[in-house]
Amino acid sequence: MAAAAASFHVRSAGAVRRRAVNALMTGALWAAALSILVLLAFFVGYILYLGAPAISWHFLTAPPSEVDAGGGIGPEIFNSFYILILTLFFTTPIAMAGGIYLQEYARPGLFTSAVQFCAESLATVPSIVMGLFGLLVFVTMLHWKVTALGGALTLTLLNLPALMRVTQEALASVPDAFREGSMALGATQWQTIRRVVLPSAIAPLTTGIVLIAGRIFGETAALIFTAGVSVSTGRSAYDFGLFHQAETLSVHLWYTHSESLVPDAARVGNGSALVLLVMVLIFNLSARFIGLGLSRRFMGK
Amino acid sequence: MITMMSMPAPPDGVLPETAPKMRVENLNVYYGKLQAIKNASLRVPKNRVTALIGPSGCGKSTFVRALNRMHDLNPSVRVEGVVTLDDEDIYAPGVDPVAVRHRIGMVFQRPNPFPKSIFDNVVYGLRIHGARGRRHLMELAERSLRHAALWDEVKDRLNHSALELSGGQQQRLCIARVVAVEPEVIVMDEPASALDPIATSKIEDLIGELKKDYTVVIVTHSMQQAARISDYTAFFLMGDLIETGKTRDIFFKPTDKRTEDYITGRYG
Ligand SMILES: Nc1ncnc2c1ncn2[C@@H]1O[C@H](COP(=O)(O)OP(=O)(O)O)[C@@H](O)[C@H]1O
Ligand SMILES: [Mg+2]
């Protein structure tokens, strides 16, 4: 192939070298991309290999055990979803309202910059520090002890900036031509936002929210101090009590590997890791498909 | 003068003068420090088509966006002067810009249908202003789509996304959307510049129909188009409104040398 090309073009030494460098770089970048794929495949494969033997209907539904072997993770799975839903319930309205304000209404100025700066700073707080803050406020100051609500509120603080960012970016992706078209028909700004801008931003918004949901689902450090390391001491293991402790799946994983006394801690830990990984992958995949499906439906493509 | 002979003649039947629907007096518009419109004054006669012509960048879009207070959406724009609709200053304190835009509709250079169904696009403004009921909305949608000469092409697929339509159909949909809310004035900013000749001539025919019920202001960079469809013409150059008058007069006996130079093609 190179010979055929040479017969058509006069080549200087420089051109040959540039071509070689180009080929080399293309190869290197392709190899880097491939290695990500291989790493993920290896990682998932290994977790699957370790965790698969632990998975059974009993494991997925039974309560955990404190001392004996044979404990399950049913309540932990339940708590993970419960705290996720609570967190989204608090985070979504505030973050979306803030994002809409900053993107659609705010005029540049001191207040806007201050809000933006606070959000960015909040976004950089390590989750363990946020957990400590939750411990001080919800557990100690308000005397709630470790609770599902305290955990969810801590996660709300942790994820508010990211979801606000997602909202802002989703709104920024809507062409101004839509806004102008609506305003030129005599719509108010709020009507424009509600009927044109938000529906047009539904795909990136949903994708962003589901991705953040995956992150909330897997969050650990912020929950250890705030939602606790045991499942509810209430009547039932599947417990909606806002003020009961609520160990999530990810916290359980940490706990079995570091503090647990059960003889089959490794089995429980590996099984939990697999379930957690699968759940988070499901969140990521569904974010993609929901986004695609919605943009097809609303954009007519 | 040879070049003028190749121009299409402006509409022959000279229409009687009408009262001004809108008046612009000493309008200045600034983008930050840049002054894009300098002390422009214009009368927009009722039920007539007024064309704004001039080379690109001369301020035509800036001028028409001042007519329905679109500049309010951009905090860095400053508008000074008087713009009246039926002798009422639309920039007077206490005037609601939303109400102004309800009465003065706008069609943009690039068709901008919403990512919704054709039906939802047409009735968007109606719903905004409180119209309800599927049957009622359907009647109004049909009327507007017929008015915009689009009904036959879309009547079987009103529930399809408006984004499936061709560019020319999208632009007529945008016109139907404006017509549906029954504004008094329709402002169009180069509505056909992104369209092919066939779609363009459909839009031009449509504008001739629209002036029976509406007052039309249209920006165009095509002098032929201005000559074909307008009754009055205003010529802009670098932010100045150089000359206004009946389209025939502007094209055949311009009083300003710069207008003549532009008409005869001495500017790009
Ligand atoms: N949003 C804007 N910000 C700053 N300058 C602008 C903006 N829009 C237009 N201008 C400037 O104002 C002048 C007039 O522009 P415009 O009204 O778009 O002209 P036309 O529509 O006749 O082509 C140009 O110099 C243009 O660069
Ligand atoms: Mg323009």
Image: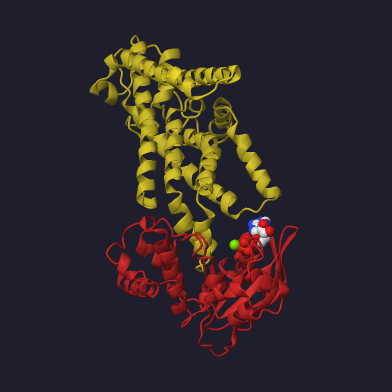
Chain colours: A yellow, B red
Q: Residue furthest top?
A: A263
Q: Examine the image and state in which quarter residue B87 appears.
A: bottom right
Query: In what quadrant does ligand 2 lie?
Result: bottom right
What residue do we see at 66% from left, 48% from top? A112
x, y percent for residue B21 = 58, 82
Q: Quadrant of the C terminus of chain B?
A: bottom right
Q: Work out whether residue A95 can be spotted.
A: no
B7 up-or-down from B171: above or below: below
User: Which residue is more in the foreground, A190 or B69?
Assistant: B69
Residue A45: image location, x then y, percent: 34, 16
**Residue closest to the far right:** B33
In the image, taking residue A129 as reference, residue A47 lies left or right, namely left
Residue A14 lies, in percent from the top left, at 60, 19
Q: In the displayed structure, does residue A78 sit left or right of residue A131?
A: left
Residue furthest to the left:
A57
Q: Nearer the viewer, residue A251 or A107?
A: A107
Residue B166 in picture, x, y percent from top left: 39, 58
- Return the residue nearer the eye: A294 or A78: A294
Residue B31 lies in quadrant: bottom right
Q: Nearer the viewer, residue A208 or B249?
A: B249
Is residue B143 shown above or below A32? below
Q: Where the N terminus of chain B falls, by quadrant?
A: bottom right
